Image (cartoon, grey):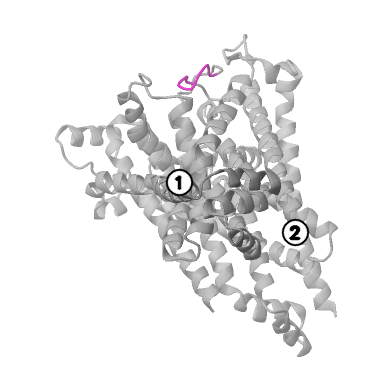
């Protein structure tokens, strides 16, 4: 029938918009990043100098790459035990009980809090706390930003892990129980090996989230263009430098910021692709 | 760890010790889970405590005060006059336009993926692209909307540019939820429609979309709640505006942008709490409603 064919074509045509957007995105980012790569070449990625003064312009992205990676790594490490315990709570220990649905809803609500609200909380609550403990005089830096990021990515790591843990077959667990295993042993010798790749994937995807976060990190990392030297050192992240310096940017500086956007796009793309591959292997 | 080594390891320990470890681990799980949800309680509590004072009728009917007005009020220890109505209308405009762009396309793409599930290449390719889009950091979408819309279409910061950034962000979410919803509809229902001789588009409009309506609505509401609080892409595209603006091609404010402005202006810091409270309340309400709908649907 004619109308059926038309419908099919309409569906196909509208799907092409996804292709157009993705392709156009890569094309535009590369196109506008070319000037800075032409001028600095590979030095753009490995240089630590960031100087927008006209005439002596020099742009290097290494401090921002280092800042993004270190805050995200810290966030991942802090999030790991928290999200793992919560996923076990929801997916195994209190499975299908009212407790776990309340906890699950609360954790999912964490994902609904806007990034800027996390930033405010980090600025007005966590930062003074760090200062009070005497860990750092100002409270800005990798540590504070990483902590807030950790809270932000907990829901992404938790909800998928909990799903996977729930899916481990009962026969396997019962077999272990019947051999006299305690619940702890069932968790470590049965559930974890069976759910391993799913849990790993969920943490990889959460890490991908952390890489691209902008506002909360911008408000807490200290926005200093240096490679962070320690846990409490200030720094800057790729997303933050774009947000902070975009307003007054044109010419080569704009191109440098877009190139940082391109790098961020590539890094998050690779991390997410690895996560998706691990999930695919699972099913 | 192989079964043999695991067995040997377990066998070496006394049963009372194993049970103690077991119990400790369980309590550890409970305590750590409690710590995990502590932040949401703390954040919400702090916003409520610090923000409620500022929320009154003016807050929803007046535009943002200028720095001088805020400073005088602060000096006299009064509540800062004015409100965030320019942000609220801006958010409505930007998010509304983003939804108008993303929802129809998202549903069409979702239907396409559902219809071509078996075929690997075209659908698989588009599904992967859509997943990649979902992972793109929002600030990069802001850059893209700047390059595409601000520079080439509206030649200046505009609400439309912000909408484009947010629409790209929302699109993959709608695609995914549409496909998942359509998979849940019994094949027989569709076949019954086709068997009656209804053309395919009518089956989609009259059978599939109404049957999956609550699923689609859940996806849409979650998508909207996801983009409502976005600040970073709007900083690069809509800029902000102290006045109410309904013109898609002009600079526009939004609630998250106002939060950022207040945060940066020491005289208006008090307004940060009320506007964040409003923003978060709005987002979480949408979130909870969509969860409610989803839960109801699962029970049926």
Q: Dot 2: few (<14), some (14–19), or many (≥20) neighbours within 10 Å?
A: many
On whether disc 1 and disc 2 are found on a single subunit, the reply is yes
Residue farthest along the left direction in this orientation: B76
Residue A198 vertical position relative to residue B300 in the rendered view, above or below: above
The magenta-colored residue range is A228-234
Number of dots carrying numbers: 2
The image quarter in which residue A67 lies: top right
Provide residue B71's location: percent of width, then percent of height: 23, 32
Q: Chain of mark 2?
A: A
A233 inside magenta stretch: yes
Q: Say above or below: B239 vs A161.
A: above
Q: Which residue is mark 1?
A: A114
Q: Which residue is mark 2?
A: A15
As measured in the structure, the alpha-carbon distance from the residue carrying label 1 to the one carrying label 2 is 30 Å
* Closer to the camera in the image, A97 or B43: A97
Against A249, residue B256 (above or below) is below
The residue under the point 76% across, 44% down is A23
In this rendering, position of residue A40 left or right of residue A203 = right
């Amino acid at each position: 029938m004619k109308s059926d064919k038309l419908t099919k074509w309409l569906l196909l045509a509208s799907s092409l918009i996804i292709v157009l957007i993705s392709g156009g995105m890569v094309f535009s980012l590369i196109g506008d990043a070319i000037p800075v790569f032409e001028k600095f070449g590979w030095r753009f990625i490995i240089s630590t100098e960031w100087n927008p003064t006209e005439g002596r312009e020099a742009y290097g992205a290494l401090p921002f790459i280092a800042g993004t990676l270190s805050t995200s790594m810290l966030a991942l490490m802090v999030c790991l035990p928290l999200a793992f315990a919560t996923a076990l709570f929801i997916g195994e220990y209190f499975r299908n009980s009212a407790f776990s649905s309340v906890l699950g809803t609360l954790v999912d609500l964490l994902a609904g809090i806007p990034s800027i609200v996390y930033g405010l909380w980090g600025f007005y609550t966590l930062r003074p706390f760090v200062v009070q403990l005497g860990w750092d005089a100002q409270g800005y830096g990798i540590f504070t930003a990483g902590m807030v990021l950790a809270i932000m990515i907990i829901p992404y790591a938790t909800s998928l892990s909990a799903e996977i843990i729930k899916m481990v077959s009962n026969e396997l667990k019962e077999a272990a129980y019947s051999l006299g295993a305690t619940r702890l042993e069932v968790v470590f010798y049965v559930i974890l090996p069976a759910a391993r790749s799913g849990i790993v994937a969920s943490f990889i995807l959460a890490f991908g989230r952390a890489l691209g976060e902008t506002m909360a990190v911008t408000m807490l990392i200290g926005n200093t263009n240096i490679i962070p030297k320690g846990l409490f050192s200030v720094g800057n992240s790729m997303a933050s430098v774009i947000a902070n310096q975009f307003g007054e940017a044109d010419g080569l500086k704009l191109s440098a910021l877009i190139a940082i956007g391109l790098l961020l796009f590539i890094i998050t793309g690779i991390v997410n692709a690895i996560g998706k591959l691990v999930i695919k292997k699972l099913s | 760890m192989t079964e043999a080594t695991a067995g040997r390891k377990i066998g070496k320990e006394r049963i009372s010790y194993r049970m103690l470890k077991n119990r400790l681990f369980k309590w550890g799980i409970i305590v750590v889970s409690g710590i995990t949800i502590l932040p949401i309680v703390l954040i919400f509590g702090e916003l409520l405590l610090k923000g409620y004072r500022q929320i009154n009728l003016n807050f929803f009917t007046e535009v943002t005060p200028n720095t001088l007005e805020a400073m005088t009020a602060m000096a006299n220890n009064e509540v800062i006059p004015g409100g965030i109505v320019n942000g609220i209308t801006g958010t409505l405009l930007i998010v509304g336009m983003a939804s108008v762009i993303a929802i129809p396309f998202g549903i069409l793409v979702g239907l396409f993926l559902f219809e071509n599930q078996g075929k690997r290449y075209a659908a698989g390719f588009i599904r992967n692209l859509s997943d990649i889009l979902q992972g793109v950091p929002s600030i990069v979408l802001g850059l893209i909307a700047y390059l595409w819309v601000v520079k080439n279409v509206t030649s200046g910061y505009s609400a439309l540019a912000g909408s484009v950034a947010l629409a790209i962000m929302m699109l993959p979410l709608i695609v995914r939820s549409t496909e998942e919803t359509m998979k849940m509809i019994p094949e027989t229902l569709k076949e019954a429609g086709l068997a009656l001789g209804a053309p395919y588009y009518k089956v989609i409009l009259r059978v599939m979309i109404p049957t999956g309506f609550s699923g689609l609505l859940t996806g849409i509401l979650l998508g909207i709640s996801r983009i409502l609080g976005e600040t970073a892409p709007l900083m690069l595209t809509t800029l902000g505006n102290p006045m109410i603006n309904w013109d898609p091609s002009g600079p526009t404010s939004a609630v998250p942008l106002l939060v950022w402005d207040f945060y940066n202006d020491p005289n208006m810091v008090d307004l940060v709490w009320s506007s964040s409270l409003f923003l978060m309340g709005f987002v979480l309400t949408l979130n909870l409603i969509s969860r409610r709908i989803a839960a109801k649907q699962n029970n049926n």
